[in-house]
Amino acid sequence: MATRQTRTLARFMMAPSVIILFVWMIVPLVLTLWYSFQRYNLQHPDRAGFVWFRNYYFFLTDPAFVQAIGNTLILVVGVLLITVIGGVLLALLLDQPIWGQGIVRLLVIAPFFVMPTVSALVWKNMLMHPQYGIFAWLAQLFGQRPIPWLQDFPLFSVTLITAWEWLPFATLILLTALQSLDEDQKEASEMDGANFVNRFIYIILPHLARAITVVILIETIFLLGIFAEIYVTTQGGPGYASTNLPFLVYVQALLNFDVGGASAGGVIAVILANIVAIFLIRIVGKNLDA
Amino acid sequence: MARAASTQRKVTVTIVAWVVALVIFFPILWTVLTSFKSEGDAINISHFFQTPWSIESYFEVQSRSDYFRHFFNSVIISVGSTLLALLFSIPAAWSMAFAPTSRTRDIMMWMLSTKMMPAVGVLVPIYLIFKTLGLLDNAWGLMIVLMLMNLPIVIWMLYTYFKEIPVDILEAARMDGATLGKELVYVLVPMAVPGIASTLLLNIILAWNEAFWTLNLTAANAAPLTAFIASYSSPEGLFWAKLSAASTLAIAPILVLGWISQKQLVRGLTFGAVK
Amino acid sequence: MGSIQLQHVNKSFGAHAVIPDASLTIEDGEFVVFVGPSGCGKSTLLRLIAGLEDTTSGEILLDGRDMTAAPPAKRELAMVFQSYALYPHMTVAQNIGFPLKMAGMDKAAIDAKVKEAAATLNLSSYLDRRPRNLSGGQRQRVAIGRAIVRQPKAFLFDEPLSNLDAALRVNMRLEISELHQQLKTTMIYVTHDQVEAMTMADRIVVLNAGNIEQFGTPMELYRTPANRFVAGFIGSPKMNFVDGAEAAKHGAAAIGVRPEHMQVSTSAGAWKGTVGVAEHLGSDTFLHVNVDGLGLMTVRTEGEKQLHHGDTVWLTPDPARIYRFDKDGRSLRAN
């Protein structure tokens, strides 16, 4: 399509981005890999040395690790379930003719723009606080004892907060996909005598399949890295009850100063994320051809 | 479908939709309302609407924790990182959209894959490198990190917008004697203004709300609003109204930007997979 | 001033040669039309001359200087695109003035030149409008205006009229021809429409599958087509071809007769057939005749001729105007 000269220029124009991204990816990754084989504690810099897979051994056999992996999975799957199912329902609802549709839409997507530290703090204090929170007030209104949510159900609470943040994302994307559904197709199926349930199963759901996959993959990428919500609300506790993998790595690195152990955790997190990334990249790649 | 039945249905659906929307929006609404209460009144939920309104919390937030310094840090970091990203990505996206080679696709895919690397995977070395270079708690350091974080998204978004510009027009500019630089400045960029603007907005939103690096790489000086808000996580007496005021201030600008750019958002966040 | 020479130009994408080997000399001031069916490489050839694509091998000379590797900006050529390619964010005046601005001309001089070009093209009252507020014909004129202000060595037109409706197309055709008369600058014009080619060109290049089939004046192509492809492509309605035994009678693998070179009779003649569709255009009538044993043929006859579907007619070709081709499609000259 273009001349050699243009292509040469193009290479020079692309080079800066490629180079900085390459450095940004490869240097820290190699360092992380390197540290993960080292005994390296910032508090004991004298006791350093190559320890092969010792860090991985300690990290993987640490009961906290198993719990953190479990928590990570529960968090990711829980949020995905809530946001995808809720998102489909909300998208179906908002796709109907309603008065004030624009405003309703703005209200629904608003939580996505709230910074994670704010959402976490608002939920922690304004809603879930066992004395002054709205939930406590509601419980008392109905004569119940208020529940200390973050104490008794820390992981559930974090899941709920995160789901609230991501529900708008799922809704927005599914709604966009829904609106691209051919109006004729919907009407044709109505003419064919399909009721709503049949229409949903045979027409709408297949049409949404791709968007749902995209939502799941992108959310998974972000949800695997959930940090601020835990940092602000529970600090991973009580115990390790709400510690996920990123938070565990953070604790190892910046609170326990165990660089080697934290790096091993980081490598494990990279491996997990890559498994998801491969699928997402395939889907986006297919779209690039179209 | 009969008119009457259809209207009745619309009423029902409208009521349901509004109720659901208000429930979802409630935490934000409640925060904004609480910010206009005094501390004592803020927790008196039963009489919330009888007690007087005031804006004193906003003044307290400013005097107590210097809201504006954090606000400016947020602005500098998010806008700075976005402009830096644009500087790198406009030429790159031009190359990909208008002079693709057989490897362009692979490069784009690879860029996307860097975005998927979990931050914890590189937290340790970045932290140590920044410590060595004295970039910890430094606005420039954060700007660079957030720029790199979002660069793949920015390149992808711009690419999808550039793709919609007919290549004829760029070729016309070349025939008219424009050098590459002039082609970008006089033709491509002005034509892509809507796309560049929404890319800019989305990136500012993402950078503004980013809360992993901003929490881990800043202390007092360069802390943006994410860190400022996080400092409220250990409560000290009654601080509901102040917390609400601070939160309102932290989210208001970005909420407005988000609402403006909601249409483009889908495209940006899904790398063009859903339009 | 503006001669253009192609020497053994080859353009390949991978193993596929879009232009296998093209050589061509266009004289200064000539109006040359590249014509051919879609995908024949005519636009590619134009883009090679423009410098928007580079040659795989071969040379392109402008005024005798080798410009094969020069970027478009350095070639001093102007191009009018099929889509017009106007800058949507600029006014008409800014569009026309853009090449001058790129050349670093000062603002007053640009204004003067733009005004002059606009006056020539009847665009003076639209100078402050943006392209989206113009009609198709006006956009076309702006594109031409942008091309002429720079006083290029040659103009390149890439199917400039194909987005206009039929009536406008005829007008613009005349305007471009008129422009050529005034400016006397070399023009290369790409089209798939042989009528545009015949009416506008000093000389025509007929392209097929990347090969130059023939290069000559319109009447040369009409009278002495080099081969069956050119014979079939030039002339409207298309030439009728007959092969087999009937062609062998003339000592050829195939013969061709133009619709206008046949006599129609209701009583006697060489080939008997039945009228299928009769198109009455007023001035002419085109008959589509199903000739026994030879297939469908088109014949032109006078407009008043009253013949209808199902009528039996006899066709007689003018013996002096029968074109003969060998088995490779090359024209056989001299009986």
Image (cartoon, coloured by chain):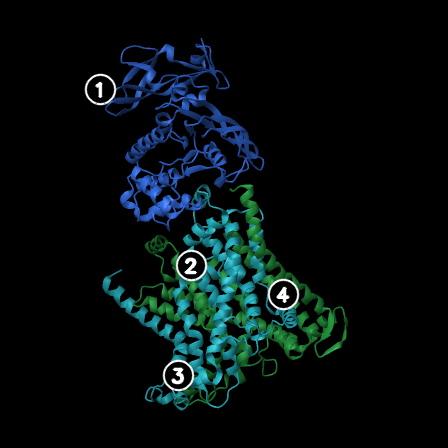
Residue at 41% x, 34% y is C155
Looking at the picture, tell me which residue is in the foreground, A272 or B168: B168
Q: Secondary structure at mark 2?
A: helix
**Residue kind at label 1, given as amino acid type:** Glu
Mark 2 vs mark 1: in front: 1
Mark 3 vs mark 1: in front: 3
Residue at 49% x, 54% y is B159
Mark 2 vs mark 4: in front: 4
Quick one: label 1, few (<14), some, or many (20+) residues within 10 Å? few
**Residue kind at label 3, given as amino acid type:** Thr
Residue at 27% x, 13% y is C266
In the rendered structure, find residue C304 and report the number of the disc placed on it: 1
Q: Secondary structure at mark 3?
A: helix
Residue C76 place in picture, x, y as percent: 46, 37
Q: CA distance from mark 2 to mark 3?
A: 37 Å
Same subunit: marks 3 and 4: no
Q: Which chain is blue?
A: C
Evaluate if marks 2 and 1 touch, with contact meaning CB atoms under 8 Å apart. no
